[in-house]
Every structure is written in C-alpha cells, then in structure tokens.
Image (spheres, helix red, strand yellow):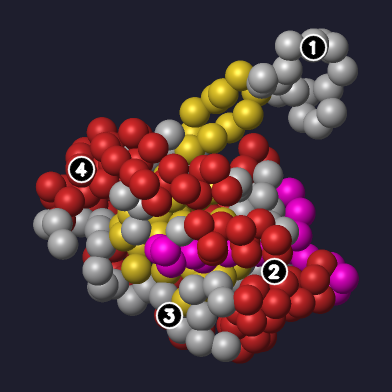
Amino acid sequence: MARVLEVCVDSVESAVSAARGGAMRLELCANLVIGGTSPDEDLFRMVRRRVDIPIRVLLRPRFGDFLYSEEEFELLRRQVRRFAALGADGVVIGVLRADGTLDEPRMAELIALAGGCGITLHRAFDVCRDPFEALAAARRLGVDTILTSGRQASCTEGAALLRELVGRSGGRPQILVGAGVNADVIRALQPMTGADAFHLSAKRTENSRMTYRREGVPMGLPGISEFEVWRCDEAAVRAARCALDALCGAE
C-alpha cells in the first residue's frame, strides 16, 4: 500500500492546519483530549468543505473500554451508516468482547453498514488479548488499516512488535503507527520497523483569549485548564511529511 501520513483532528482549525502542513489523510474526531470520540455531523461537513484530502471518521460512543452495550452498539450502527452517507472516505472503529478478543460479528455488521468505505481498526487493537489473533481476524473482516502503538504507551516503546506486525501483515492490513509520532520518531522508526504509515495529532497548546478568568472551576477532567485549547501545529505536520517523504519517496 502507498505511504500515509494521517493527522488526527477535532476542529476545523486543526483540519485546515493539517492539510496545509501536508497531511495525506485526516482522522476526524471530537474530544481529542480524552483519546477521541465520535464527531458531530456538522463538524464533518465543515471540514469536508475546507479540505480536499481523504477523511476517516473515528466512531467511538464514549471514553473508556471497547465493550459496548446494545444501546451503544446501536449508536455505532447509526453513526457508521450516517457518516458513510455523508461521504466519509472511511470509518475508524473497534469492538471487543469481554475476553479481549475482537468481536468479529459486530465488526462485520459495522463494516457492512459502511458500504465500501475504508476501515481502520483503532487502538482497541492495543488492548486486545492477542495481537496476532486480532491481526488475523482483521484480515478476515477486510479491515484495510490497523492503528497501533505496538501495544505500548508510545510507539517507540512498541517498536519491536510494530516491526513484527508490519512483517506479518504484508500490507494487508496496513499497519498505521501512532502514539507519540513526530518527525524524529518517523526517522527513527521507519527504518527499524518498515512501516510506511504514521498517525499523529501534532498538537500544540494555545492560550485562551479570555481576559477575565475564573480559575478553580473545572468543567471536565481534573488538572486540565479551561483556558487552554489544543490545535494542530502546521509546522510539525510539515516536518513529519518531509521525514516520511525522505524515507519512503515523495510523490
């Protein structure tokens, strides 16, 4: 498969910056600060109007594990169908059973609803019971991409497994390396693993433009300031793209 530089974004501003920086594909989500959840349809529409690169949509109904209730799975069904109809180039999904295996029947149902869209198995893969069992299941299902850190907190820590996954997959599915990716990591990991697909958020923290600030009233996760905003750093994306092009060949 062709090389990929995918940038995960949760705003129109970040999507535009990523595209300008040379992203080859976007993963669109909401709430990147908690690992990403399903985005709003209007966000997708606004991003689609502003960028001309492929967009895959992360579909995750909530923060936490990937064992979903019937109600949560019904929401996933609806979201897959809706974003496919809206013109998403792909969906990013993952469903596990309680025993840590990939839930093939539920995954197959979502893939059928996607109607030919690209399919990424997200980092549910990194918390499954057996990565090679999950790799085989993903191949049976027709998944074209697996996003993984090599089952570690960062992709550099997971380099040995990433190398093995790239070798075993043979590009079917493509191993998309994520978690801690930047230009330096690409330069280090690409020769080590043979991976040709990398995923990053390239996030930077911007200060709020609020001049009046009522501190000490958290609205969400403890320890995260209400007066900071995450945005994609265009320069970091450009550096990552240059690194990937240098190692895997520019178009």
- 6 with respect to 188 (left or right): right
Q: Amino acid at mark 3?
A: Arg
Amino acid at pointer 2: Arg
Find disc 4 in the rendering and name its residue: 243
Q: Which mark is residue 213?
A: 1
Amino acid identity at mark 4: Ala
The numbered mark at residue 139 is 3
How far apart are the alpha carbons under marks 1 and 4? 40 Å
Distance between the alpha carbons at the discs numbered 3 and 2:
18 Å
Reading the chain from its start, which is encountered first: label 3 or label 2?
2
Query: Closer to the camera, 224 or 121?
Result: 224
Which of the marked residues, 4 or 2, is nearer the chain's N terminus?
Answer: 2
Horizontal and vertical percent for residue 193? 23, 52
Q: Nearer the viewer, mark 3 or mark 4?
A: 4
Crowding near pointer 1: few (<14 within 10 Å), some, many (20+)?
A: few
Upstream in the sequence, badge 3 or badge 1? 3
Q: Are marks 3 and 1 in contact (CB under 8 Å)?
A: no
Binning the other alpha carbons within 10 Å of mark 3 as few (below 14), some (14 to 19) or many (20 upward) gives some
Q: Nearer the viewer, mark 1 or mark 4?
A: 1
Q: Magenta residues?
A: 52-71
Q: Is 181 on the left-hand or right-hand side of 79?
A: left
Please tell me in which quadrant of the rendered image residue 230 appears.
Answer: top right
| The N terminus: image quadrant | bottom left
SS at mark 2? loop
The image shows residue 28, relative to residue 110, as above or below, that is above
Compared across the picture, whether 226 is left or right of 208 comes to right
Residue that appears at 76% across and 54% down:
62
Point out residue 148 in the picture as x, y percentages from the top left corner: 45, 54
Q: Residue at x 26, y 56 (%)?
A: 195
Q: Secondary structure at mark 1?
A: loop
Tag 1 near tag 4, CB within 8 Å: no
Q: Which residue is mark 2?
A: 97
